[in-house]
Image (cartoon, helix red, strand yellow):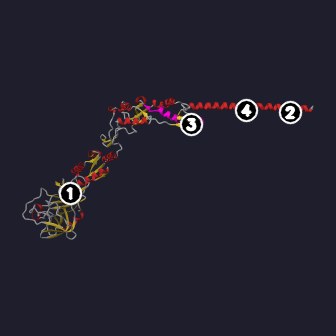
Amino acid sequence: MMEGVQKNQREEAKEAEKAEKEPLHLKWIVIFVVLLIAILAAGMVYYKKVVYYQTRFLPNTSINGIDCSDMETAEIVGLLDEPIRNYSMKVSGRDYRTGQAGVTIGEITSADIQLTYEDTEGAVTELLNQQKPYRWIWAYYGGGNDCFVERNIAFDEDMLESAVKSWDACRKSNMVKAEDAYISRTPEPEGYYEIVPETMGTELDVNEVARLVGEGIRAQKDMIDLEEQGCYREASIRQDDKELTETVETANRWLSTSITYDWNGTEVILDHEKMAEWVSIDDGKVILDEEGVAEFVREQAVAYDTYGKTKNFMTTLGVEIILTSRKYGWKTDVEGETAELIQLIRQGSTVKREPLYSVTARRKGMDDLGNSYVEADLTNQHLYLYQNGALVLETDFVSGTMVSSYDCVTPEGIFGLSYKTVNAVLTGETYRTPVSYWMPFYGDYGMHDASWRSEFGGEIFMTNGSHGCINLPLDMAAQIYPYVSEGFPVICYYYGGAPYIGMLTTPAQEATVPGEGGEWQEPGEGMPTEQEE
């Protein structure tokens, strides 16, 4: 019985195994069929996408920065052309009324000039033809494809030119020409020079403006500045021009000159008022009226010089007489002072000064004699020496004879001592006469000792006088000599004029030559040289 049971169990097991094998086979068949169907379905999907991307751009494709994934050509063309349809460009420059910079003077839009791209559709179609539709899945998962199409911009240039010419700023009648900076003089009393800045013109070359605007449109700029582009006709001379600046600085430096003169004791102020008469600018050059400067110096010399002018003099005897300053007084060196003043003006100096003098006196002012002088009373043949107002000595003398040529008459007037020397020799054609003290005061007229004379004073001079010099006793000449020096006043006069009689003899020619310690003295001012008999 046991064996029967076991047999049955084995048979049941075989049946069960057989039943299990039959479903497994069917399962694989089902799986295969399912996979086949899936593959076919996927293939159909892939194929459909390949067909789909024949007329559309692959995923993650951009053109000129626009996402064009799954888009057809027409749609993309619309997107790419949209900016040009809405394009506008502003043009800035100077306000034609005020000259203010950075003002919008015009604007160009697409409609103004029929602005288009030349062939967007062709460019997009060419890109589409270049893509590989079967790579759509790689494009989807593999990253983007950035494309760029270059298209030429087209517009109507005649319309552009008309649009530009229609702007107010581009109308000839509204344009203001630029003006150069120039030099002007400020109103008196200042009267200094200044630079008037250049005028910022608004004059444009309209054809050049149209050309630049066209270039900006082709570059798709949204703004151009005509001033930055150098479209305006500018002034050729600017405010900071070196030549203008130097000219104004020079002129104003000269105008600022201020000189306070002590002109023989009188204050003479030379300031801006006078400078304004002399300083000018002509053809960009600073001009100084040098003749005006010279005339000014001459005028002051006439007004304040005392050399050669007449003076009232009170003699020791109490008689007031009028004498000419024949070689004494203040005499301006007009030529030298003119040159000095011109130089000071060119430097723009502010100084106090005295003019240059060719001759000076002992005291400033019109009364320039002071209180130290030699007084020679030719009528009374008597000499007085004053020092600081005190009479220090007096003596008789012998002056020029009245019975020879008039050149022998001792001249009257006010003189300044030319120089002094000792041990001179007075010579003529037939003699040589030494003197110990020689003090000339007018050419070869002078004072000296005359040891050959035994008498002085009285009327000796009338018939036995000198040839013009003042003959002194030796001791008096020696005492006078230390008191006098170059320029020391010597005053000679006659009461009622020289008592000239006329020529009775022919005087010899004379000259002064050096002796021991002496100096050569040329005859001066056509006067005869001294000769003693």
Which residues are drawn in magenta? Answer: 115-144
Is residue 131 highlighted in magenta? Answer: yes
Query: Mark 2 highlights which residue?
Result: 10
Q: Position of residue 64 (x, y in %)?
A: 50, 35
Verify CB contact (< 8 Å) between mark 4 and mark 1. no
Q: Position of residue 505 (x, y in %)?
A: 7, 65
Residue type indicated by callout 3: Gly
Residue type indicated by callout 4: Trp
Tally of numbered discs = 4
Sort mark 1 into few (<14), some (14-19) or many (20+) by Cα contacts within 10 Å: many
Sort mark 3 into few (<14), some (14-19) or many (20+) by Cα contacts within 10 Å: some
Verify CB contact (< 8 Å) between mark 3 and mark 4. no
Query: Mark 1 or 3, which is nearer the eye?
Result: 3
- Taking the spot 76% from the left edge, 32% from the top edge, the residue there is 24
Alpha carbon distance from label 3 to label 4: 42 Å
Alpha carbon distance from label 1 to label 3: 114 Å
Query: Mark 2 or 3, which is nearer the eye?
Result: 2
> In the picture, residue 59 is in which quadrant?
top right
Query: Which quadrant is home to the C terminus?
Result: bottom left
Mark seen at residue 28: 4
Mark seen at residue 328: 1
N-terminal of the pair, mark 4 or mark 1, is 4
> In the picture, residue 202 is in which quadrant?
top left
Residue 17 lies left or right of residue 272; in this view the side is right
Residue type indicated by callout 1: Tyr
Q: Is residue 202 something one can see in this rendering?
A: no
Query: Mark 4 or 1, which is nearer the eye?
Result: 4
**SS type, badge 3:** loop
Residue sitting nearer the eye, 313 or 329: 329
Is residue 490 highlighted in magenta? Answer: no
> In the picture, residue 155 is in which quadrant?
top left
